[in-house]
Image (cartoon, rainbow, N blue to C red):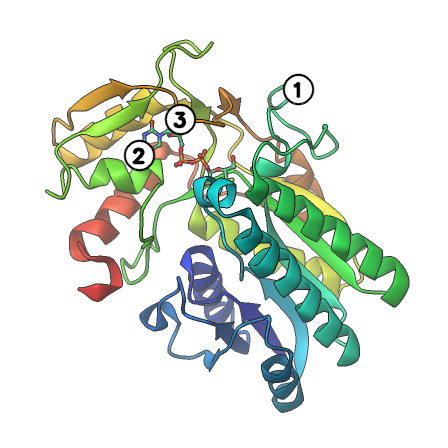
Amino acid sequence: MAILVLGGAGYIGSHTVYELIEAGRDVVVADNLLTGFREAVHPKARFYQLDIRDRGALDTLFQAEQIDGVIHFAASSQVGESMSNPLKYYDNNLYGTMVLLQAMTAHGVDKIVFSSTAATYGEPERVPILEDDRTVPTNCYGETKLSMERMMSWTSRAHGLRYVALRYFNACGAHPSGTIGEAHDPETHLIPLILQVPGGKREKISIFGDDYSTPDGTCIRDYIHVTDLAQAHILALDYLLHGGENNVFNLGNGVGFSVKQVIDVARKVTGHPIPAEICPRRAGDPAQLVASSEKAKSVLGWKPEYDSLETIVSSAWNWHKSHPNGYNT
Ligand code: UFG
């Protein structure tokens, strides 16, 4: 029996496939390669190039493979783009998930772990954020992810599907081997953008606002290593395989770092001065997002290994140094 990883050529998906293969699992990867990279797919995984909105392609896959459970990363994930092109998010994230659930139901595949996000909470009522805190997304990306959670819940009631939604905080870092890492085009995330300065691709890093109500005035986020996220997916899948009920888990380190602190860590790790410039706030950024991941720890037995920001930034730097143009090098 195999595990199907949808979006397994993307950033978090490719790292999860590496951990699954390392754990001796049989893995099938499907990805439309619009934002993912064929080179990121582990050579031991069986690969299908398909779009989850293509029901015929999903039917062919489910007929050809014995799928025990699905891990679903195949979605659009840029907050800014979701505001300028919301219907793309409804199409890829919601319609895509609907077609996937129809195919799973038809083929009797009833377990799914999928990427949700801290963006489902919107502006948090308090930090650290707990799973049953209010969810009022402030962008269309978070809205579609919350709707995906609800789609799973209704499908579960009707058809017996069981699901785990994993709400990630700020995914970062790269595989310790340096073989795979973060490669987005355009890049919008803080750590890879900072590392473009010592990498010689950018002169300085912009700090989006230093007038937030935080100790140094810059936004605070909870940075979690991609390999720790990958491990959580495997634990969540095993939880479902062992009969676990529908559930939602936050995944973060539970420690917040400000934008200025992240830049300082990158200066230390790279030995580069990394000039920074204060710029206006970016629309829609909450001042602080920090997870309580106690539930994932107690229910799934999750133990993040990369709890030092220095180690996280070092692993990212290792990848970017050896792949200055991502997978196109
Ligand atoms: N930032 C800068 N300068 C930059 C880029 C980012 O100051 O050049 C700041 C942002 O304003 C923010 C912090 O760095 O305060 C982190 O920004 P990212 O874009 O790296 O990450 P976000 O916190 O905005 O978003 C991440 C994921 C989203 C997810 C969200 C959930 O990328 O997919 O967390 O909170 F929705």
Quadrant for ligand 1 reads: top left
Mark 3 Cβ inside 8 Å of ligand 1:
yes
249 left or right of 230? right
Residue 265, position as x, y percentages in the image: 27, 28
Q: Nearer the viewer, mark 2 or mark 3?
A: 3
Q: Is residue 46 visible?
A: yes
Q: Nearer the viewer, mark 1 or mark 3?
A: 3
Q: Is residue 257 left or right of residue 179?
A: right
Q: Is 266 left or right of 311, judged from the image as shown?
A: left
Residue at screen point 27% across, 58% down:
178
Label 1: state its secondary structure: loop
Q: CA distance from mark 1 to mark 3?
A: 20 Å
Q: What is the spatial separation of the Cα atoms under label 2 and label 3, in whole angstroms?
A: 25 Å
Name, please, the residue furthest toward the bottom.
Answer: 64
Q: Secondary structure at mark 3?
A: loop
Query: First in sequence: mark 1 or mark 3?
Result: 1
Above or below 17: residue 79? above
Disc 1 + disc 2, Cβ < 8 Å: no
* Residue wearing tag 3: 282
Residue 187 drawn at (x, y percent)? 31, 46
Q: Which residue is mark 1?
A: 125
> Can you say whether 272 is above or below 210 in the image?
below
Left or right: 22, with 247 as reference point: left
Residue 301 visible in rendering: no
Q: Residues within 10 Å of mark 1 (few under 14, many from 20)?
A: few
